């Protein structure tokens, strides 16, 4: 699958399951193993697993290949290897601790994202929008 199409498929799959703080980085200048790193946050183990599953399904539906998935047993950090694209799905504390943006973030790729994909997840809120609205009205 062409790189831009695969990148869009992954982003759309992440947005379908309400991933937060999606970032895409061009890694061609750093490694010849893959061309893009996509990092997204999830508010729970359940959501990281759902995101990984949706990325795999949508990639296969669109003719792409899934090489491997790691980390689903704990769900704190799930990696999906799609060959040219590597997807990291992380809970916010894990993402902050490992700071992959520092390693891979030299060349961010501009992509169109839904507004909810840009914000940080709210603590204690799973990925269902109605929960986020309830949280927001209760604490804001």
Image: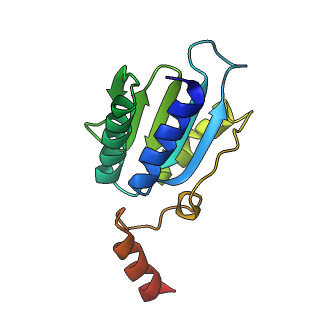
Determine which quarter of the picture holds residue 56.
top left
Against 138, residue 84 (above or below) is above
Please give the name of the residue rendered at 55% of the width and 24% of the height, measured from the top-left corner. 2
Against 77, residue 2 (above or below) is above
Residue 17 horizontal/vertical position (percent): 38, 54
Which residue is nearer to you in this view: 80 or 60?
60
| Residue 90 visible in the picture | no
Q: Is residue 126 left or right of residue 37?
A: left
Colouring rule applied to residues: rainbow
Please give the name of the residue rendered at 36% of the width and 24% of the height, measured from the top-left corner. 66
Which residue is nearer to you in this view: 5 or 120?
5
Residue 68 horizontal/vertical position (percent): 35, 22
Q: Is residue 56 left or right of residue 19?
A: left
Determine which quarter of the picture holds residue 62.
top left
Which residue is nearer to you in this view: 127 or 2?
2
Residue 91 horizontal/vertical position (percent): 43, 50
Q: Residue furthest top?
A: 32
Please give the name of the residue rendered at 50% of the width and 28% of the height, measured from the top-left corner. 86
Determine which quarter of the picture holds residue 126.
bottom left
Q: Is residue 138 left or right of residue 120?
A: left
| Residue 86 visible in the picture | yes
Residue 13 horizontal/vertical position (percent): 42, 45
Q: How many marks?
A: 0
Please give the name of the residue rendered at 59% of the width and 31% of the height, measured from the top-left corner. 4
Against 83, residue 106 (above or below) is below
């Amino acid at each position: 699958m062409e790189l831009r199409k695969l990148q869009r498929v992954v982003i759309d799959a992440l947005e379908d399951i309400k991933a937060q703080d999606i970032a895409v980085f061009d890694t061609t200048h750093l490694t010849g193993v893959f061309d893009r790193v996509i990092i997204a946050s999830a508010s729970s183990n359940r959501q990281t697993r759902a995101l990984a599953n949706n990325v795999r399904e949508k990639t296969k539906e669109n003719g792409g290949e899934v090489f491997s998935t790691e980390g689903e047993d704990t769900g704190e950090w799930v990696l999906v290897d799609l060959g040219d694209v590597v997807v990291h799905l992380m809970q916010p504390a894990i993402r902050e601790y490992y700071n992959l943006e520092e390693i891979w973030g030299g060349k961010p790729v501009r992509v169109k994202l839904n507004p909810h994909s840009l914000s940080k997840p709210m603590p204690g809120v799973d990925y269902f929008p109605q929960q986020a609205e309830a949280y927001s009205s209760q604490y804001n």
